[in-house]
Every structure is written in structure tokens, then in C-alpha cells.
Image (spheres, helix red, strand yellow):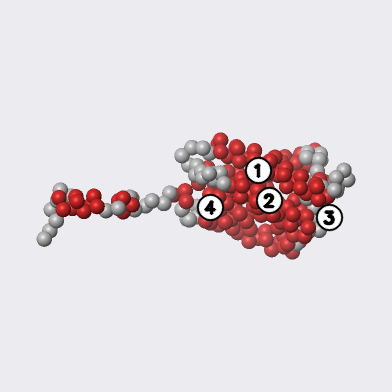
Amino acid sequence: MVCPGTSCPACIHLVCMLPMQTMSPVNTVSPLLSSAPFTLWVTIPYTIFLVILVPVYWVYLGPQNFLWACDIALFMTLYALWRRSVLVASMAVLVTLMPDILWVADYVARAVSGSDFLGIGATAYMFEKSVPFFVRALSFFHFFLAPLLVWMIYHIGYDVRALRWQTGVAWIVLPVSYFFTDPVRNINWVHGFAGIPPAWMPPVVFLLLIMLAVPVLIFWPTHWLMQRLFSGANTFKRA
């Protein structure tokens, strides 16, 4: 027997008896949450850049160097590009945007006038002739990493969970940098600014202040800005 179509009383009764979820559209996954990577013209060159950077840094700067927050952000960005991860991209922009703006300003000021814009020697290593120029040139990622992450967030949205997740990461990385790296390297500035240990307080107290200051003074303002800029239709938010 052939069904006469949607006007058939039996068919109407059957459809009404189906669970509601079976009547939802087939494609219920938001494109913002797709696992497809970004356009390959961005993802592949960025991947090649890291393939070059990692062995060079490992040989010339040592594995400790990868504990720098900006270097960790490089790997987070790589993951976010390939996996289209809203959360990881949002975490990376928190740790990147403000520090990279300050790094670029300090570098330009030092290159143009020789002045230390930040007063903490943040980019002094870029002018050390003892370090091969090619190794120093890789640090120019500070010019493009933050804009890249903002562009990504513009397309896939900003995840408000990033603030607490990135704070948790920082509270792991900062103590590890303090206890397990060479104090002379001063990874993530945990031993004082400009390489000068704080004589006015115990070193561990300074570490605790850094752990408090980073989320409050760096992460939170960027988190606030991302919410304000990307609060439209393209923004994926989760409390």
C-alpha cells in the first residue's frame, strides 16, 4: 500500500507521536564549534613557522624558554587554528594581547631612540649581537600573534570561560618557572623586573604578587575588551 503523502491521517498521527528531537534539523552543530581548521593559507604558514622556531629555540635558548607565556601562547594558537577551538583561542588572546602591545612599543622605542620604553629590558635581547640574528628575528612573532588571535576570535567568537581557565594555567606555569628554571633567565619575570630581585620583599611573596597581578592587570582587562568587541552574533559565550 502506498502512502498518499503528508495529508494521510496515519502519517500525521505517526509524526505527532515521534519524539521532538527526531524532528530537529539534521545539522544541529553550530559552525562556531566545528572542528574544521581555519583557511589553510593561514594555518599552514603558521605551522611551518613553528616547525622552524621550535628546534631553533631548543638549540639556542634551551627547553626552559618554552615556559615563557608568549611561547606557550604560540602552541595554543596552533591548536586553536587546527581544531577551531573557541576556548583555546580565547585563552591565548588573554595572555598575548596586552603583553605583545607593550613588547612592540618597547622594541620600536628601543630601535628608534635607544630608550627602554618599559624600563624592564623586555626587548634588550633583541639587540644583543651575541645571539644570532635569525634567532632574534623569530621573536618578531610578537608583531603578528595578537592580531592573528583577534582575527580568529572575530570569526569563531570569544568564550568567557577563558578567564578562569587561563588563570589556572598561569597559576601552574608561574610557580614552575620560579622553582624549576634558572633564576638568571628570569622566565616570566618571576624573579623580579629587569633581572633585579626584589630586595624589599621575600622572593616567594613577590611570586605570589605576580600570580595575583597577572590575572587582574593583564587577563581581566583583555577579557573585558573581548566581551565588548565581540558580543554580536559571532560570539560564542558560555558561563
Give the tally of numbered discs. Answer: 4
Q: Tag 2's secondary structure?
A: helix
Expressed as whole percent of the image width and height from the top left, the position of residue 195 reads 83, 49
* Mark 4–mark 3 distance (CA, rounded to whole Å): 35 Å
Counting residues from the N terminus, which is met first, the one under dot 1 or under dot 3? Answer: 3
Counting residues from the N terminus, which is met first, the one under dot 4 or under dot 1? Answer: 4
Residue type indicated by callout 4? Ser
Expressed as whole percent of the image width and height from the top left, the position of residue 98 reads 67, 41
> Is residue 124 in sight in this rendering?
no
* Mark 4–mark 1 distance (CA, rounded to whole Å): 19 Å
The answer to whether the residues at label 1 and label 2 have Cβ atoms under 8 Å apart is yes
Quadrant of the rendering where the N terminus is positioned = bottom left
Q: Tag 3's secondary structure?
A: loop
From the viewer's perspective, tell me whether residue 66 is left or right of residue 38.
right
In the depicted structure, whether residue 235 falls above or below residue 70: above
- At label 2, counting other C-alpha atoms closer than 10 Å, the crowd grade (few under 14, some 14-19, many 20 or more) is many
Residue type indicated by callout 2? Ala
Residue under the point 61% across and 41% down = 223
Residue under the point 65% across and 43% down = 219
Counting residues from the N terminus, which is met first, the one under dot 4 or under dot 2? Answer: 4
Expressed as whole percent of the image width and height from the top left, the position of residue 201 reads 85, 45
Where residue 85 is drawn, which disc sits there?
Answer: 4
Residue under the point 66% across and 52% down = 169
Q: Mark 1 points at which residue?
A: 219
